[in-house]
Image (cartoon, grey):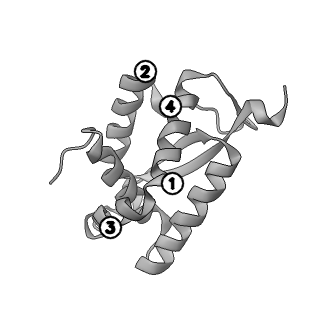
Amino acid sequence: MTSDDRYTLFGVYLSADVFDALAEHLYAEAGVVDYGNYFDSSDSGVPVGDPGADATDDLLADVVASFADLYDEADFDAARRVDADAFVLAHLAAEPQTVTRARERFQAAATIQETDSRTVHTAVLAAFLSTMDGLEAD
């Protein structure tokens, strides 16, 4: 199996409600039942063709493609109010180039917002999932 046949794991920190919305989205899209334990973070990669991995690859590619709009829609103030100990680590499997692009965009957004990555991860993914009806707007 070549490296092109495997996705890279990308870790994002999310508030509990955004994590739950992501889990619901992945259940609906790929039948992922236990998202919190779906990916093994010690694996060097996840095979292409795994339904959950394909779904997170599509999701992250969509986030990267629409990042500017999602940034504009994101509620960074709400994400800043989440207690620092309340964030949950979620893993997304995606093509290595997509992971690199996502990492660059999230880091740039954190710099612009003068905040940490978990705040940006939560705000941007909440904005994305709200367009998918996976998260209720406040």
Reading the chain from its start, which is encountered first: label 2 or label 3? 2
Q: Which residue is mark 2?
A: 33
Residue 30 higher or lower than 59, as above or below? above
Horizontally, is 123 left or right of 7 in the view? Answer: left
Q: Name the residue located 32 percent from the left edge and 67 percent from the top edge.
A: 72
Q: Is residue 97 visible?
A: yes
Q: Which residue is mark 4?
A: 55
Q: Percent from the top left, x then y, of residue 74?
A: 31, 62
Q: Which residue is mark 1?
A: 64
Badge 3 amino acid: Asp
Q: Percent from the top left, x then y, of residue 3?
A: 81, 36
Q: Name the residue located 51 percent from the left edge and 52 percent from the top edge.
A: 12
Reading the chain from its start, which is encountered first: label 2 or label 4? 2
Q: Percent from the top left, x then y, of residue 104?
A: 60, 65
- Looking at the rendered structure, the secondary structure element under dot 3 is helix
Image quarter in which the N terminus is found: top right
- Looking at the rendered structure, the secondary structure element under dot 2 is loop
Reading the chain from its start, which is encountered first: label 3 or label 4? 4
Badge 4 amino acid: Ala
Task: Choose mark 2 or mark 3, whichever is in front.
Answer: 3
